[in-house]
Image (cartoon, helix red, strand yellow):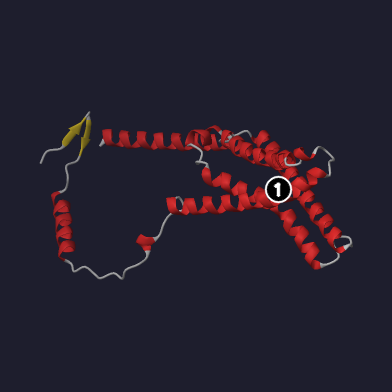
Amino acid sequence: MTDTTIEGLDLPAADPSRRARATRRRAASSRAPRTHREPTAASARIGGDHKVWFWLQVIGLVGVILSALVVSASALIVVGGWQHTPPFLDPLTVLMIDLPMLVAFVCSVTFKWRGFTGWLWAARIFGGIMTAFSASANFLYTVSASAAISGGTGLDTYQEITGAIVHASAPVLVFVCFEFFGQIITRPKRNAARLRKMTVKELRHVEKEIAKRVRAADLLEAKALRG
């Protein structure tokens, strides 16, 4: 059998004995009896991006967010009356406090996707401030309502303390669950966006790796030409 030439590069012909051994191994493996494997649950498992799992997460988070917003709104409407504005404006207090919190969360997801680090932290800080403000308003409302019923300070019993803390936790639940929700529904960043964020050190490492592979390819080509 003659050697094969490809663009000036001489490649040795295939070894017939090696091919024969490979043929015998394939024939022997085809004749070998197949061992019985016990059935497993591997085919029933789902990945983290499976549609069923994704929608279960979305439905659960949306349910928590909506329920927490309703509970928080029940206090903020009453707190709106403490401003001594016209009564028909009281429901707007819910939008004035909780809506900016939600807008901040949505903007933080967008800023993170675009790589705006400064605006991302500004949106998160603003959302955290509005969350703390809403939680404080809910806490004070519950304390005042308990004081009006019992005639005490509103924090005299563990029931009153627990009710105030639970009511104040509603905006915190919105904060945490909305952050989870934003991370789940957004797509991962593209490789191009990752390359734009690579540091100088990482780029130099990639450059050295490419140069190393180019030198290795040149050595192999030179050795083949000499042989």
Closer to the camera, 191 or 181?
181
Does the rendering let one see residue 134?
A: no
Q: Is residue 10 above or below residue 46?
A: above
**In the figure, residue 35 lies in which quadrant?**
bottom left
Q: Relative to residue 188, is residue 85 drawn left or right?
A: right
Q: Relative to residue 16, is residue 41 drawn left or right?
A: right
Which residue is tagged 1? 73
Residue at the spot 86% in from the left edge and 63% down from the top edge: 150
- Residue 64 appears at what percent x and percent y? 61, 53
Does the rendering let one see residue 68?
A: yes
Q: Residue furthest right?
A: 152
**In the figure, residue 162 lies in which quadrant?**
bottom right
Quadrant of the snapshot with the C terminus: top left
Residue at the spot 85% in from the left edge and 40% down from the top edge: 84
Closer to the camera, 130 or 156?
156
Mark 1 closeness class: few <14, some 14–19, many ≥20 residues within 10 Å: many
- Residue 154 appears at what percent x and percent y? 85, 60
Q: Relative to residue 221, is residue 147 drawn left or right?
A: right
- Residue 94 appears at what percent x and percent y? 72, 42
Residue at the spot 73% in from the left edge and 39% down from the top edge: 92
Could you tell me the amino acid type at mark 1? Ala
Q: Is residue 56 above or below residue 28?
A: above
* Secondary structure category for the residue under label 1: helix
**In the figure, residue 204 lies in which quadrant?**
top right
Closer to the camera, 15 or 165?
165
